[in-house]
Image (cartoon, helix red, strand yellow):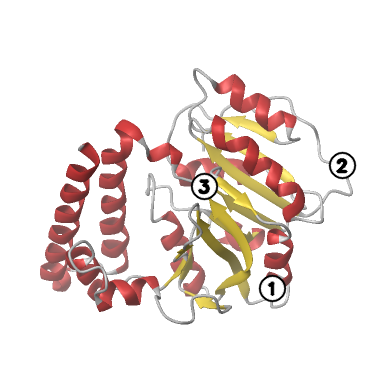
Amino acid sequence: MMMGLMSTAPTPSPEAARVAVVTVSYGSEVVLAPFLSSLSTAASTPLHIVVADNKPAGDSKSVSSIALAAGAIYLPLSANRGYGHAINAAVAGLPPEIDWVVVSNPDVVANSSAIDRLLAVARSDSGIAAVGPRILEADGTVYPSARAIPSLRSGVGHALFANIWPGNPWTRRYRVETDQVLVQRDAGWLSGAFLIIRRSVLDELRGFDESYFMYFEDVDLGFRIGKLGLRNVYVPSAVVVHTGAHSTQGGESARMVRAHHESAKRFLFKRYPGPLLWPVRVALAAGLDIRARLAERRSSR
């Protein structure tokens, strides 16, 4: 795994917590400082923080300065090989005593005690591999961050009807849109916008699947956790606010829409290999391509 040179940064003290926070910057100067600041009240224990930079040119000094000012380690990467690769690179350099890894987008603000609440649940059962909080959008609405693993049936239905029939049963089943939305429960997968994973499990799975450049690496991780017989648990008493997907705004939005749908196809084709499912795979690919084209047209207006 190729990694950029790590810049000079404070070395965590021997009594530092066994919890690390890793995040990925891609032109994230505006949102990075509030995110790092929020961590001070999210956990009552010291945190080992790493900021991996997928865009270390131009304003990288700003990202480096923000990270180092917050006591984080700054890790510039030599090339943008995707979100999962950046997270894996950051985790590869963590001290061996780290037991838990908080994976987070930089455009998130963690509420008070959010990490403490998540860790309390995670530590309560050795069968829990990952925990995720309630994620609020900037307007206060709840983002469906703890979902079912998509099947071919729900994948095709969601792909074909989500835009023209938002309340369709396949989309609702995939997003787990029920009256249980604020109840602690098991989930098929947890949003990679903010989640905590056992370091031992992350190592066993060899981290995120780097064949996903962006999107669905968290779905794939949750799926593989389930295959180990371990649990992904949604903990709505812990709250974070997603302030906005800054890295996909502007001219890159259409490309990111296409990347999302390509990743969806990659996951479902990986989960359901074999020639017998070819007609369903064709229908799924067609549905996702139609959704991608419609979304690209909207983003170009």
Task: Characterize the local packing of mark 1: few (<14), some (14-19) or many (20 or more) Cα atoms within 10 angstroms.
Answer: some
Q: Is residue 63 visible?
A: yes
Measured in 3D between alpha carbons, the distance from the residue under mark 2 to the one under mark 1, in whole angstroms, is 26 Å
Q: CA distance from mark 2 to mark 3?
A: 32 Å
Q: Is residue 264 left or right of residue 291?
A: right
Q: In the image, is residue 92 above or below residue 4? A: below
Residue 95 in sight in this render: no
Q: Secondary structure at mark 1?
A: helix
Taking 155 as reference, is 178 left or right? Answer: right
Label 3 amino acid? Thr
What amino acid type should be assigned to the residue bearing mark 2?
Ser
Q: Tell me the mark number nearer the camera, choosing from 1 and 3.
A: 3
Between 205 and 74, the one nearer to me in the picture: 74
Q: Which comes before the other along the chain, label 2 or label 1?
A: 2
Q: Where residue 243 is drawn, which disc sits there?
A: 3
Q: In percent of the image, x 21 and y 37: which residue is there?
A: 300
For residue 119, side relative to residue 215 (left or right) = right
**Residue 57 image point, x, y percent:** 49, 20
Q: Secondary structure at mark 3?
A: loop
The residue where tag 1 is placed is 121
Q: Residue at x 64, y 36 (%)?
A: 33
User: Under tag 2, what secondary structure?
Assistant: loop
Residue that carries the numbered disc 2 in the rendered image: 13
Q: Position of residue 243 (x, y in %)?
A: 51, 47
* Residue at the farthest right position: 15
Among the two numbered marks 2 and 3 on one chain, the one whose residue lies closer to the N terminus: 2
Where residue 19 appears, as percent x and y from the top left, is: 73, 54
Q: Position of residue 249 (x, y in %)?
A: 37, 37
